[in-house]
Amino acid sequence: MKNWLRRSPVRTEPFDKAQDRPVEVPAGSSTSSDRTASQSESAEHVLRRLEWTVIRRLDGLLQGDYRTLLRGAGLDLADLREYQHHDDVRHIDWNVTARTGVPHVRVFTEDREMAAWFLLDLSPSVDFGSGEQRKRQVSSEFVTVLARMLTRHGNRVGAMLYGAGVDHVLPTRGGRRHVLNLLNTMRARPAAVEAGTTRLHELLESAGAMLKRRSTVFVVSDFISEPGWEKPLGQLAQRHEVVAVRLLDPMELQLPDLGLLTIRDAETGEQLLVDTHDAGFRKRFASIAAQREAQLRVALVRAGVDALELSTDADLVEAIVRFTDMRKRRSRLTSGGLPAHLKQAA
């Protein structure tokens, strides 16, 4: 059975009933004048726009949640205090607790300096978008926002870019100029070509071999790939803090009734004429998409990574804030509670 989710519309045009044929549009033609305008923006203009429209909003919404979103690896002992509800039991100082008879915990100062890596899937399927934005643009804006937020706090960011293979590595550096270099590198990538199916496991395995120091790793991909990426993703998560940033478009989940469409596999170039007016076809498409969604979520859970979904029709700020809230709640749950014998002693 063909994998319909690999197929991206050349253009979503309805069936031309007057001519009794589908509207023919050359492959690769633009679907929005806004995209052309966006591509013509300089990297400096894009970064400045994101700083005003996205990062300023996040500063006001996240406030102190930056530590929840991105945690450092180093801890320095700062103080001792009595145990409070929601404290991590692993931080209990048993010697002080035994001497005083009251549970005490160690208070640490977190070392915020860290390295963050973006593993960027820029394969042809990421060039798809049914609305005003493509997945590639969403990826670019997300990476720019996170990179700028990190570098403003003194951290370093790097990137590994995957097209037909892992063909570019940006070492970790800090500063606004480095963020501009990263943005320019992503934007300078050539237009999608038929490079064969994506092999995401190559990107993950390369990262596992190259990243020696514990880091925060963002895997930014639509996860439309050959099988086999699940194991290297889990291995990467055993050593690093990994976040799977999944790019998607609403049309990958459900097709609207647009009549006859010519759809093309962005990675192999294969084309097919389909009738989206057929309710049975749309239902089968939605069923296959739902099945793939369930399998993908199970794979990410088994790999032990957090997941953030970025849709081409969603607000980037809301997605990041929602993800931060989820991590905060999970952090509270995993902090544990006071053991029963200590509750009695208290």
Image: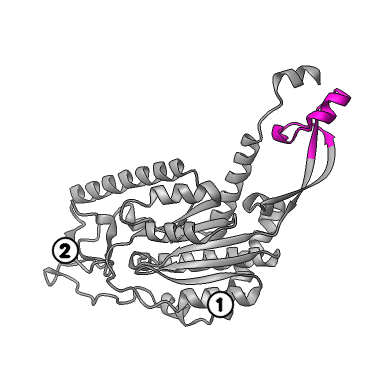
Whether residue 233 sits left or right of residue 142 in the image: it is: left
- The answer to whether 98 is drawn above or below residue 280 in the figure is above
- The answer to whether 323 is drawn above or below residue 337 in the figure is below
- The answer to whether 219 is drawn above or below residue 80 in the figure is below
Q: Is residue 266 magenta?
A: no
Residue on which the image places disc 1: 181
| Residue 286, image x, y percentages | 28, 48
Looking at the rendered structure, the kind of residue marked 1 is: Asn
Is any part of residue 133 visible from this angle? no
Residues in magenta, as a range? 81-106
**Cα–Cα span, label 1 and label 2:** 41 Å
| Residue 131, image x, y percentages | 38, 65
Where is residue 37, by image quadrant?
bottom left
| Residue 41, image x, y percentages | 51, 81
Is any part of residue 200 visible from this angle? yes
Count of marks overlaid on the render: 2
Looking at the rendered structure, the kind of residue marked 2 is: Leu
Tell which of 188 and 158 is nearer to you.
158
Q: Residues within 10 Å of mark 2 (few under 14, many from 20)?
A: few
Of callouts 1 and 2, the N-terminal one: 1
Q: Is residue 92 magenta?
A: yes
Q: How is the image coloured?
A: one colour
Tell which of 99 and 3 is nearer to you.
99
Q: Which mark is residue 273?
A: 2
| Residue 68, image x, y percentages | 65, 49
